Image: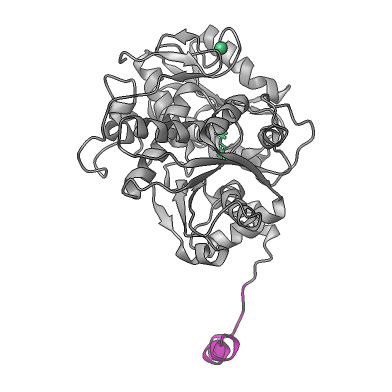
Amino acid sequence: MKNLKMYCTNCKREYPIQHVHPRCMLCNEPLEVQSVSQGKIKEGNPLTQTILERYSDFFPFNDINNDLSLNEGFTSLVSSKKLASKIGIKNIYFKNESENPTWSFKDRGTLLGIQHAYSLGYKKVGAVSTGNMAVSVAAYGKRAGFETFILVSKTIPEEKLNPVAIYGANLIKVDGDYGNLYYESLKIGEKQGIYFINSDVTYRVEGSKTIAFEICEQLKYDVPEYVIVPTSAGGNIRGILKGFEEFKQVGIINKIPKMICAQAAGCSPIYNAFIKNTDTVKRVIEHETIAHGIENPFPPSGNQVLRKLRKNGGICISVTDEEIINAQKELAQEGIFGQPESAVPLASIKKLKKQGFLKETDSVACVVTGSGLKYTKVFEKHNLKAYECNIEKLNFFIRNNFK
Ligand SMILES: *Cc1c(COP(=O)(O)O)cnc(C)c1O
Ligand SMILES: [Zn+2]
């Protein structure tokens, strides 16, 4: 490992870079790798590089094992002038994370976590998740040849189990308080040498930096005014902001976009704290939203997201399920089918423009966090239809029905 420190995001206590437990011994807030202040993007062709190689100056590893990679990252940034002009802002960019190996941005952080586990000599990894992270860690863990443990809640629907099980990881349905499982798994991991790459652990946050790095490269270092991130645990938005901060620190960009933390109205603990202007996120007791991937009622990085947003000048917003479904359809009509979570940024743009927060001169990047095919139950909400016609009448049918 390089000579970088780790420190508590809250009380600033220092930890060694090899440290695995992701939270501070004193205040229980998340730990973070010290920001990189010198570095550049590696020359070469991204088609033949991994994200770990191209941005290696920004990660603490001395040796990179490319066999752990599934060629995650380097996803498209799709510009939509059409939606932008309809809404009345300068431009909208969609960072399409559904192009990752397991169809969500989680693969970036999983690679970083697996690389860290590997560099420390671990043989076992795990995750607590019922969604994209479970799939991602199952895929990468097995590929690396690690004993892989995926802990899910006992009540997980059957259709979510098999996309995890197919990779051959040890899948354990746990009976008990799912909210506690995050902390419980970290304890068990320490006792049994299992590296849990949970939602907002230190190296998962490092992985999300690459979303920011790529946006900078894709926009030729002319970054947008805002980046909107659908937020649950808070690891992804932390990582993206850290990425922009590091690129600014080393002089690759000269401005940091303001971050917008977007949540579903049915479960919005960070938003609630933000509008009340408090420093700590309170657990949401009752919650319901169609965007299950951002339904964490007590986000482990919530307080840190609040701290960072205030420094960065960013804001929080929440949108209803109805607004999410509408945005999902609009996004699909631009050729991008994201899961409901991934439509939250577009729904947020529409709301923020109506509220007068976004201006006509603003450009906004939306993180489309995962693929729409992950949650096909959503089709029920969309009133979709198909026509039917006899082959002899087809010519007539098309001529007469679609002017
Ligand atoms: C995990 C996930 C999120 C939330 O990311 P956090 O780092 O937990 O804030 C959003 N969208 C999708 C599709 C996800 O899988
Ligand atoms: Zn601390």
Q: Position of residue 322 (x, y in %)?
A: 71, 55
Q: Give the side of residue 72 with respect to residue 375, left or right.
A: left
385 magenta-colored:
no
Q: Position of residue 83 (x, y in %)?
A: 52, 63
Pick the front one: 229 or 138: 229
Residue name at image x 26 percent, y 38 percent: 49
| Residue at the right extreme of this rendering | 286
| Residue at the left extreme of this rendering | 44
Q: Quadrant of residue 250?
A: top left
Residue name at image x 59 percent, y 7 percent: 26
From the viewer's perspective, is residue 37 above or below residue 23? below
Pick the front one: 363 or 293: 363
Q: Main secondary structure of the magenta part?
A: helix
Q: Give the side of residue 5 with respect to residue 317, left or right.
A: left
Pick the front one: 27 or 266: 27
Residue name at image x 75 percent, y 31 percent: 284
Q: Give the side of residue 79 with respect to residue 347, left or right.
A: left
Residue 387 in sight here? yes
Q: Quadrant of residue 251?
A: top left
Q: Position of residue 206 (x, y in %)?
A: 42, 28
From the viewer's perspective, is residue 396 above or below residue 170? below
Residue 165 in sight here? no
Ligand 2: which quarter? Answer: top right
Magenta-tinted stretch: 386-403
